[in-house]
Image (cartoon, rainbow, N blue to C red):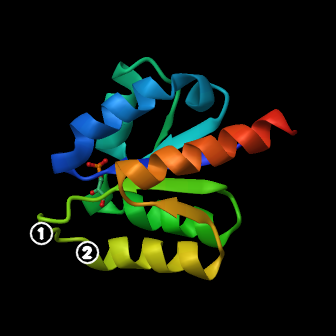
């Protein structure tokens, strides 16, 4: 079972909800994690998700730590490129650790769609 984290900045939460609904077959067959508020929305969309702390309170850092420990297969992080975020250092840490540990990372919906296709193909072969 794939282990996937989903995160969305406030300006991108509606897109994340639409995205998880569009791909609910994959997400309901995965172990899903999310930062706190994103997780609430994902739950309301009908999916089972393990909620971590809210992003600004350390949720991104918790997901970064899971990446470092080899506990995630993919991170889907819809970033609001126009927003300013008090926890930007945590965001950068998460992106860096995904690159360092070669964990699949999508930071916008177009790339996430391609990532999901790849994960579905892998799951079909497992
Ligand atoms: O801030 C976030 C990502 O950096 C997201 O956190 P929430 O899902 O708790 O809003």
- Kindly tell me whether mark 1's CB lies below 8 Å from ligand 1: no
Label of residue 47 in the image: none
Residue 104 can be seen in this image:
yes
Q: On the picture, is 43 further left or further right than 80? A: right
Which corner quadrant of the image does residue 104 belong to?
bottom right
User: Looking at the image, which residue is at 68% across and 58% down?
Assistant: 71
Residue 52 in view of the camera: no
Q: Are marks 2 and 1 in contact (CB under 8 Å)?
A: yes
Q: Position of residue 63 (x, y in %)?
A: 50, 60
Q: Quadrant of residue 59?
A: bottom left
Residue 112, placed above or below residue 20: below
> In this view of the protein, which residue sits in the foreground, 82 or 57?
82
- Residue 84 shows which numbered tag? 1
* Image point (37%, 78%), residue name: 92
User: Toward the viewer: 56 or 45?
Assistant: 45
Q: Secondary structure at mark 1?
A: loop
Task: Say left or right for 66 vs 83.
Answer: right
Task: Name the residue tied to disc 2.
Answer: 88
Q: How many numbered marks appear?
A: 2
Q: Quadrant of the N terminus?
A: top right
Q: Position of residue 102 (x, y in %)?
A: 65, 73
């Amino acid at each position: 079972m794939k282990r996937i984290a989903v995160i969305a900045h406030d300006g991108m939460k509606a897109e994340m909800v639409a995205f998880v609904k569009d791909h609910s077959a994959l997400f309901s067959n995965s172990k899903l994690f999310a930062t706190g508020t994103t997780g609430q929305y994902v739950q309301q969309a009908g999916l089972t998700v393990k909620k971590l702390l809210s992003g600004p309170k350390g949720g991104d850092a918790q997901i970064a730590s899971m990446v470092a420990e080899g506990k995630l297969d993919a991170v889907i992080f819809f970033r609001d490129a126009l927003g300013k975020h008090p926890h930007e250092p945590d965001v950068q840490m998460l992106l860096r650790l995904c690159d360092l540990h070669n964990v699949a990372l999508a930071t916008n919906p177009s790339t996430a769609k391609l990532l999901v296709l790849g994960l579905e193909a892998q799951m079909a072969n497992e």
